[in-house]
């Protein structure tokens, strides 16, 4: 046997020695499960003798199910450092817990596994006490009455030796048995008390939906911040520059023609930059959308569109700010696509609230043939709608008309 193998064996033996911390922890873990498994044993033992035994057992199991599960999860977390996720949120009420019902996995653990591990844990504790008593028999054998087998002769006897050897064997075997039983109990609890695969996937979907909603809100907040910074900073500086150049253009006299031409060109460029920056700010987040809502913002889009737009808005309540922003940009991009590709003479735009959904329908009398698979414009609209759990549909036969239907939740 190599030195490294011998070292591993000695290390493993030290870890499972009766005096080691791991052995004490495993034994404590099993002992803590004894009181949690004995109630089920008692119900199964005494309920059949009662008139309504099965009904009593079922009621007690349903009432104590969540309490027992919580206690078992706490035992595993405190003594094994393993967090077994619960099937329900921590703040779930009794109604939700009763509706969740008794799953077969929990029933198997609380009615079968927990009682078996309780019996095993109790046996380990009793065996440990018996082994300790046997290993130290020479120290207290003199306390036994005269004529006893343990006090059959003076001094050390063969009976005392066999008893001490047996006790030491038990003491050294118990840590290995405790470690094995504790590992089996831990794996059983993790498999039977935690959520199943379907529940884990549902919880994961909920977490992803929450994180996505947070990302959308954060992106909208960042867009608002950039809009405010541009509007209050760069745009105001450009306006001031354009005013100064315009004032210089009107008041300066005796300036050489070349210099005046530079001033005029700078004034024109400053005005063009203001227009471009204003359009950029409006594209980031229009101020009118935040101040006056979606109806007024869409009216502004319709008024600026190169194609005549007939707008109809019917909103009983104002959607959330994020949904308003998504709806605004969807309509803006859709009208831009119509002006660029559809060769339409008219667009009908309707926005209405149906229960908790915001329905947007954009119809143009253009040439049709719009295919989301061949262009990035419609794909971008679909992605915007999907970012807030919305739906997107296009009907565009050759020759027209083209109808874009978008449904968004009113609240994110």
Image (spheres, rainbow, N blue to C red):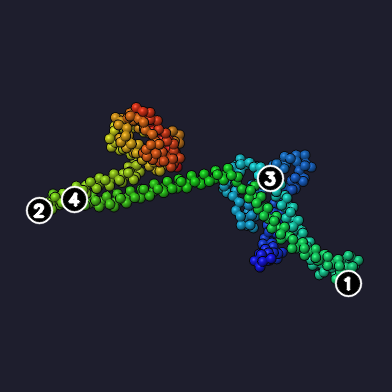
- Check the image and name the residue furthest to the right: 147
Residue lying furthest left: 254
Q: Who comes first in sequence, dot 1 or dot 3?
A: 3
Seen from the viewer's position, the closer of residues 177 and 235 is 177
Residue 99 is labelled as none
Residue 79: x and y, percent?
64, 58
How far apart are labels 1 and 4 at the CA level? 120 Å
Tally the marks.
4
Residue at point 32% right, 42% down?
Answer: 288
Q: Position of residue 283 (x, y in %)?
A: 32, 44
Q: Is residue 112 left or right of residue 325?
A: right
- Which quadrant of the structure image shows residue 341? top left
Q: CA distance from mark 2 to mark 4?
A: 16 Å
List x then y, in percent, for residue 130. 79, 61
Q: Earlier in the sequence, mark 4 or mark 3?
A: 3
According to the picture, the residue beneath numbered tag 2 turns out to be 256
| Residue at the top extreme, as displayed | 399
- CA separation, marks 3 and 2? 98 Å
Q: Is residue 360 toward the left or the right of residue 96 in the image?
A: left
Residue at the image point whose x is 79% and y is 64% from the top: 167
Q: Which residue is mark 4?
A: 266
Mark closest to the chain's N terminus, 2 or 4: 2
**Mark 3 sits on what residue?**
108
Dot 1 or dot 2: first in sequence order is 1
Give the SS element for disc 2. Answer: loop
Separation (CA) of disc 4 from disc 3: 83 Å
Is there CB contact under 8 Å for labels 3 and 2?
A: no
The answer to whether marks 1 and 2 mark residues whose Cβ atoms lie closer than 8 Å is no
* Residue located beneath label 1 in the image: 154
């Amino acid at each position: 046997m190599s030195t490294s193998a011998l070292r591993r064996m000695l290390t493993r033996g030290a870890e499972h020695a009766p005096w080691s911390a791991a052995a004490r922890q495993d034994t404590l873990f099993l002992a803590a499960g004894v009181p949690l498994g004995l109630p089920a044993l008692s119900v199964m033992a005494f309920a059949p003798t009662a008139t309504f035994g099965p009904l009593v057992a079922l009621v007690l199991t349903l009432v104590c199910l969540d309490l027992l599960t919580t206690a078992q999860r706490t035992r595993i977390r405190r003594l094994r450092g393993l967090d077994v996720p619960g099937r329900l949120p921590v703040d779930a009420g009794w109604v939700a817990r009763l509706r969740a019902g008794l799953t077969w996995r929990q029933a198997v653990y609380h009615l079968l596994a927990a009682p078996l591990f309780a019996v095993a844990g109790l046996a380990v504790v009793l065996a440990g006490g018996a082994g300790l008593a046997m290993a130290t028999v020479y120290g207290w054998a003199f306390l036994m009455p005269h004529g006893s087998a343990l006090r059959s002769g003076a001094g050390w006897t063969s009976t005392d030796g066999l008893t001490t050897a047996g006790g030491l064997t038990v003491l050294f075997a118990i840590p290995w048995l405790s470690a094995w039983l504790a590992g089996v109990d831990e794996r059983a609890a993790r498999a039977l008390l935690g959520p199943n695969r379907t529940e884990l996937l549902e919880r994961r979907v909920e977490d992803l939906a929450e994180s996505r909603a947070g990302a959308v809100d954060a992106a909208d907040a960042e867009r608002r911040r950039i809009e405010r910074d541009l509007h209050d900073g760069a745009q105001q500086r450009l306006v001031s520059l354009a005013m100064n150049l315009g004032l210089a253009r009107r008041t300066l006299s005796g300036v050489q023609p070349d210099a005046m031409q530079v001033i005029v060109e700078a004034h024109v460029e400053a005005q063009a930059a203001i227009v471009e920056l204003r359009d950029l700010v409006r594209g980031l987040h229009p101020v009118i959308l935040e101040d006056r809502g979606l109806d007024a913002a869409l009216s502004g889009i319709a008024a600026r569109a190169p194609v005549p737009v007939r707008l109809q808005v019917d909103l009983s309540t104002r959607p959330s700010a994020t949904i308003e922003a998504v709806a605004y940009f969807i309509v803006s991009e859709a009208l831009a696509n119509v002006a660029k590709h559809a060769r339409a003479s008219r667009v009908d735009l309707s926005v209405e609230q149906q229960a908790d959904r915001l329905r947007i329908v954009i119809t143009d009398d253009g040439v049709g043939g719009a295919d989301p698979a061949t262009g990035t414009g419609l794909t971008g609209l679909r992605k915007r709608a999907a970012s807030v759990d919305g739906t997107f549909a296009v009907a565009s036969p050759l020759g027209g008309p083209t109808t874009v239907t978008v449904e968004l939740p009113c609240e994110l």
